[in-house]
Amino acid sequence: MKASKVREGLSRNSSDGAMLSFFLQGGRRATLLRAAAMTLVIALADWRIEGNIPLGFLYLFPTLLAGTVLTRLQIGFSALLFTVLTEAFDSYEWLAPAAFPRDILIFTAFFCTGQFVYEIVRSRHNSMQHSVELEREALARGEAEEQLAVLIESSPAAVFTTDARGTILLANQAAHRLFGVGSDSLRGRSVQDFLPSLGRVVAGEKRAPIRTAMQCRGRRLNGEVFLADVWFSTYSTRAGSRLAAMVTDGSEDLRNREELSLHQLLAGSRILVGAVSHEIRNVCGAIAMAHANLARRGELAGNKDFEALGNLILALEKIASMDLREVADQSSSVDLPALLEELRIVVESSLGEQDIVLKLDVEPGLPPVWADRQSLLQVFLNLTKNSERAMTESADGTLTERAYGAVTERCLTLTARREAQGVSVRFRDTGCGVAHPERLFRPFQQQAQATGLGLYLSRAFMRSFRGELRFEPEADGSSFIVELSAATVTPAAPLKDNHAPSNPDSAGRRSQPVPGEPEPVARG
């Protein structure tokens, strides 16, 4: 079918298009039948016509037809056949000295004519196929460009390109809205008027292309300043280097981060000051009792320093008894599996650097829980860091060995399971354990890292949205269980006293250590 199309194209381009179109119509079989019929007619004519009139040259016409459908080898056989027919019906006597050169010339003429037509047909076919491929590629390129244009124009992020001088060449509608241009066009303006840092990058880029992201200060046309998140890359064209950039307004994210940081700071400060006030109250109580005993004896009656000490005790008691204002409750419905995946993203790389394996086992279909998302994430981070520190200290020389001398694998397993009234998340590690469980969740522990407020604040955060944090000893390592209420259950009011620890023994006690086992370190 392709050969027939090519032949039709050839016939349309010839001067005698009507006749050639008739002979070249149809497929391979029809063409060969026409060539055979022409051969038969020429042979009969050459046989019947008497006289020295050579008709062998007429075999060029069936050769032209056959060359459009035959292969090179088949064209050679047809040329040999036409040579034999020419000699068979020729009126001249066949003599070897004169016949061999003549037959060679006749064969060469037929063969070269067929090869010439064959090459024309093949070239025509290749050119047509190439033309079809070009049309297909142009159509695909046009569709891709149209889709890309729609994607860029409908993108909520500002997308634009600049030249080597920082002049904006193209920009979508989002870029016009972001920079506050309005009905004017960004084309021809300098990017340095809106993103000075990006303008300096364009002016200073003279080497290899770069692909990176940055956060910088942006400026709108009316002078309003915003925080810009920029992803950009440079590339080279015949007209010079170019820059393509995508920009989003990160001001809202910045405000949210700062508000969350302020919320965490207020909540942590409230609990911290409450713990300090609790300790001051205990000290003031002891001092006040001693002061009262001395006052009953009357030995220091009228002593100005003794009276000043009493006034100082009253002032300290008043400071310690001040009620701190409760911060706003930020509790809401939280997707716990999504939060655990976010925790994995945050801590997995740091745990991997310490050769600690993080395993996450989440029961499918867990209900949403009632919590303050940021506070809960802080609790999870604190428990993860405690486990990481415990297992790192174990690797430094205090790690126990199991039977047969196999070293305990450093692994942190997070297991989330549905409970009767909510969901529990267990943080189980293979670290050194806890030396004094009764001291857990108390502030200002002397053997703890930093101020020893990590677990104290974590439990206070949990109780602020009616959750709980408790410890369970393990044969090797330790477990902390975070208990959360399901969002479908209306939570009760948070606990009023977050400063005084509950029964110290409720934290759990570890069984007696195995003889020869190194003493575990305390956690903060």
Image (spheres, rainbow, N blue to C red):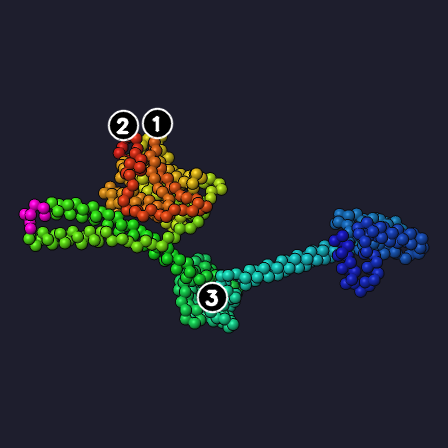
Q: Report x, y in % for residue 195.
A: 42, 66
Q: Nearer the viewer, residue 312 or 128?
A: 312
Tag on residue 178?
3
Query: Which residue is found at the position 26% from the left and 39% from the top?
Result: 439
Q: Which residue is mark 2?
A: 515
The reply to whether dot 1 and dot 2 touch (C-beta < 8 Å) is: no
Amino acid type, mark 2? Pro
Which residue type does callout 1 highlight?
Ala
Q: Is residue 296 magenta?
A: yes
Q: Residue at x 10, y 53 (%)?
A: 307
Q: x and y percent of residue 159 in the render?
A: 50, 63
Q: Is residue 317 above or below residue 512?
A: below
The answer to whether one can see residue 117 in this image is: no
Picture layout, residue 155 above or below residue 365: below
**Which of 389/265 is in front?**
265
* Rendered-image quadrant of the C terminus: top left
Residue at the image point whose x is 34% and y is 53% from the top: 264
Number of residues whose C-alpha sits closer than 10 Å to that of mark 1, classed few (under 14), some (14–19) or many (20 or more): few
Badge 1 marks a residue whose secondary structure is helix
SS label for mark 3: helix
Q: Which mark is residue 403?
A: 1
Q: Read off the magenta span.
A: 294-301
How much space separates mark 2 and mark 3, taking CA atoms? 69 Å
Name the side, left or right, on which 439 lies relative to 59. left
Res 468 seen here: yes
Of callouts 3 and 1, the N-terminal one? 3
